[in-house]
Image: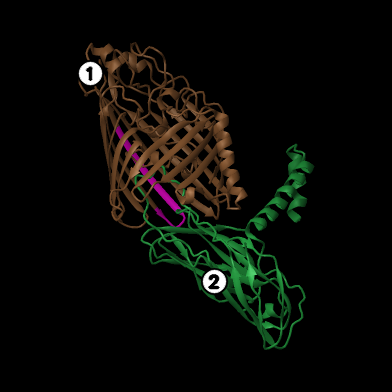
Chain colours: A brown, B green
Amino acid sequence: MPSRGTILPMKPACAACLFVLCAGASLNAQIPPAEPIVLAGGRLTVGGNVSATFGPEDPGFFNYTDYEDSVLRMLRLDLNASFRANDHLSLLGELRSQNVRAPQAYALYLRVRPWTTRRFDIQVGRIPPTFGSFARRSYEADNPLIGYPLGYQYLTSLRADAVPSSADELVNMRGRGWLAAYSVGNPVPDAGVPLATAFRWDTGVQAHLENEVVDLTASITTGTLSNPRLTDDNSGRQVTGRVALRPVAGLIVGASAAHGPFVSTDAVLDAVGSEGDDSFAQTAWGGDIEYSRGYYLLRVESIYSQWRMPLLEERLHSLATLVEGRYKIFPGFYVAARLDHLDFSEVASSSGPVEWEAPVTRFEVGGGYSVQRNLLLKLTTQFDRRDGGRTRHARMLAGQVVYWF
Amino acid sequence: MANFRRLPTRWALAGIEWRNLWLVSVMVVAWIAVVPQSLTGGSPGAPPGGQPAAGRSGAVRGRVDIGQLARVVERRPGISDLGARRARDEPDRARSVVYLETAPRAAFDLVEPGRASMDQRNETFLPHVLAVTAGTVVDFPNSDRFYHNVFSLSKAARFDLGRYATGKSKSVRFDQPGIVRVFCEIHSHMNAFVLVFAHPFFSITDGEGRYRINNVPAGNYNVIAWNEGMAADPKPVTIAAGAVAELDLAVR
């Protein structure tokens, strides 16, 4: 789905050259390559991430982020930059290329700090996600494992531009979120959406206020958690809020909520014959806890999401829950594990009540070794189980090399 | 070498051309051994070069001209941050370390390891450069209100102190001479140097670049100035008993 995110297309070769030039500039200057490159008298800072992930085929599409890409078989190249115009104004952006395709502007926004003495910022443009905790640390170096949490990656059969005409049609798509097709709306088969995608950022305005203990963030965006957008498709706005508390060092407790129209205007028109209102929406609640001390780090996160779809009487509910831990065995080497479950509510089909999408459970365990500070090797094995679809079980071993500066 | 001898049997059993593997391993090890030193300017406190020990000592002093200050390590662009990060202090990059390239053999018996401290304050290691003798224990207190995680993957000292909160301190004993690059796992821009010497003949310059190394046995020496990973070419000096030799150095 490149069209959803492309606002600044660039040939892959150009992006590669840019990346190599930046890395080369770092080496020529004899700056240790872990450091970002600083230009324009300190106003422009450029960083980068490269990750190559090697894994087997995923016939059950457990790790796909759209119809083409699997997290376990991906070459990702990120080039990010921050330009500080003055103490009040900065421009931040990131170009990202996946599997040597044309780079997309993953992020591009203006950061305004009205008062330099107060930690209050307004960000406008393609902004970081307000909801939850994982989507802002989805860089490979921040992810102790290779796979992504199900709630942020697993493709359900739900789409914003095409809707099922009945519960039976929806149930027929169970376990086929990687390429779902419905009779109402856009007839072209396409990938479904996760609960809250970590692979695209939304467009809008965000306000953030923090002190040593509390973080408050609110945003208004064009798309929704499941379907962040650059351009609007339903004239609706999503409102998202997040509160994070840091009562003691090492503990972060967060709560998030979001609500916004999900189904596209075209799909609503096809379904009900009028534009309707904004009630065909996605509403989500999230809670997350992170605690770290010494050599271990523990994270628990849960996302509850519900969608109201045209032509379906019942609301569709989903709950994603993960528990993740990391422990450093010795300098440069850690082990990590994540248990993840994605559950769905039942709908009344002609064959009786059944979950509208097949529940999925994933357990991933592995470790990472830092060859040097900014060169990380990971090896993980992943066990997936799905109560539906053609492929119900999968076990995949994957390796990843991550380099950043 | 014992490990290398055992390797061929294992790899042969696995059907792998172990001869090639061995060659590649040697190349990789050689590369690892050479590259970090080229980046950091070599290892301080090299083994003694047989300089004659003297019964009486003198001193050497002078000034180090570093030309241009090394660039501050900037934070990585915080694209996924919800707001601008808090202000932080800049490390003092003007301080250089001046040391004797070699030292009298007897000097190595006289080294008494002590204790030193490198604070973590306002997302900066203080001091930014620490020079100690081998065996010294360095404390790393955390004076910030949030976590830090001091670690190093340097050859001379590989350690990870884990995450600890304000008011807490953890320590590392530096036994092996060399340059140790210290980082914080949580704040990627935080970095510092610990130079570990096998002898006590070193000094850190003051804010104006002045240094003085005392109690050096009379003799001929090479003096090196080091700043932010770059070392000046060794400069010869003759130290006479009871005298103070003058020697200015330039790093860049």
Taking the magenta stretch, the answer to whether it contains residue B165 is no
Q: Determine whether A235 is above or below A243 in the image.
A: above
How many residues crowd mark 1 within 10 Å: few (<14), some (14–19), many (20+)? Answer: few
| Residue identifier under label 2 | B137
Q: Is residue B57 left or right of residue A272?
A: right
How many residues crowd mark 2 within 10 Å: few (<14), some (14–19), many (20+)? Answer: some
Nearer mark to the viewer, of 1 and 2: 2
Label 1–label 2 contact, CB within 8 A: no
Q: Determine whether A286 is above or below A84 in the image.
A: above
B195 and B237: which is toward the camera: B237
| Residue range (magenta) | A292-304
Q: Is residue A348 left or right of residue B245?
A: left
- Distance between the alpha carbons at the discs numbered 1 and 2: 70 Å
| Residue identifier under label 1 | A313
B65 and B115: which is toward the camera: B65
Q: Determine whether A34 is above or below A309 in the image.
A: below
The residue type indicated by label 1 comes to Glu
Q: Determine whether A169 is above or below B179 in the image.
A: above
Majority SS type along the magenta span: strand
The residue type indicated by label 2 comes to Val
